[in-house]
Image (tube, grey):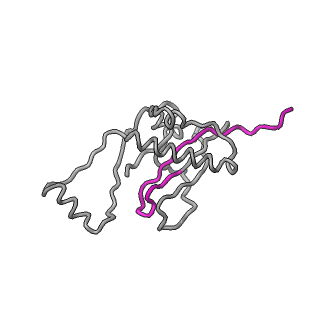
């Protein structure tokens, strides 16, 4: 799995066009993992590289996050969706701004079980420099959590500002 920096919208005051660093996490989930790596390398060291983020992976995370947020709408209230271009039009230019890894503000999963296959939870956040105005609705996703794979933060939308009743 790929480890990403946090979504740009949470830390940068300017537009983030891409990921400046990607790291790959590989876990030994089969007993013969080392033998398979040795066989693939035919006696030479095996090296894995990834220069860009897979667009399909971005889109999959966006779909999971948006669906989960919509399922939780009664609990979280409304939000202005930010992922629709990624989901419906396959426009991935906003990916680095809205999809990324955890930061020091990311809350841990409320599910402490170590045998859970995937974990998904919802939270809210603000850009550290913006203490007023609406914040963001964020869905955290940890695929293959039982193998301690990376967590992703997906900014699904802007919170609706609190509004009073008008007649």
Q: Nearer the viewer, residue 16 or 85?
A: 85
Image coordinates of residue 160 in percent, x first then y, are: 69, 38
Whether residue 163 is in magenta: the answer is: yes
Q: Is residue 1 left or right of residue 156?
A: left
**Image vertical order of residue 112 relative to residue 143, above or below:** below
Image coordinates of residue 34 in percent, x first then y, are: 23, 63
Please tell me which residue is depicted at 42% across the width and 46% down the height of the picture.
4
Please tell me which residue is depicted at 37% across the width and 52% down the height of the picture.
1
Q: Is residue 73 left or right of residue 62?
A: right
Q: Which residues are magenta?
A: 140-167
Whether residue 166 is in magenta: the answer is: yes
Image quadrant where one finds the C terminus:
top right
Q: Is residue 120 left or right of residue 92?
A: right
Please identify the residue farthest to the right as the structure is shown. 167
Q: Nearer the viewer, residue 117 or 52?
A: 117
Image coordinates of residue 118 in percent, x first then y, are: 48, 58
For residue 22, what is the image quadrant? top left
**Image vertical order of residue 149 relative to residue 64, above or below:** below
For residue 149, what is the image quadrant? bottom left
Q: How many marks?
A: 0
Q: Nearer the viewer, residue 33 or 2?
A: 33
Image coordinates of residue 9 in percent, x first then y, are: 53, 37
């Amino acid at each position: 799995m790929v480890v990403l920096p946090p979504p740009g919208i949470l830390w940068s005051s300017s537009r983030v066009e891409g990921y400046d660093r990607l790291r790959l996490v590989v876990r030994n989930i089969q007993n013969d993992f080392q033998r398979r790596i040795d066989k693939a390398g035919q006696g030479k060291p095996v090296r894995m590289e990834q220069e860009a983020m897979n667009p399909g992976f971005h889109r999959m995370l966006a779909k999971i996050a948006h669906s989960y947020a919509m399922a939780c709408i009664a609990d979280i209230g409304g939000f202005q969706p930010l992922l629709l271009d990624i989901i419906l039009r396959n426009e991935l230019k906003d990916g680095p701004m809205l999809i990324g890894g955890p930061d020091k503000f990311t809350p841990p999963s409320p599910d402490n079980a170590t045998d859970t296959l995937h974990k998904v939870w919802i939270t809210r956040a603000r850009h550290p420099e913006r203490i007023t105005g609406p914040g963001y609705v964020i869905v955290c996703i940890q695929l293959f959590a039982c193998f301690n794979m990376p967590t992703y933060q997906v900014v699904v939308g802007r919170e609706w500002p609190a509004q009073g009743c008008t007649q």
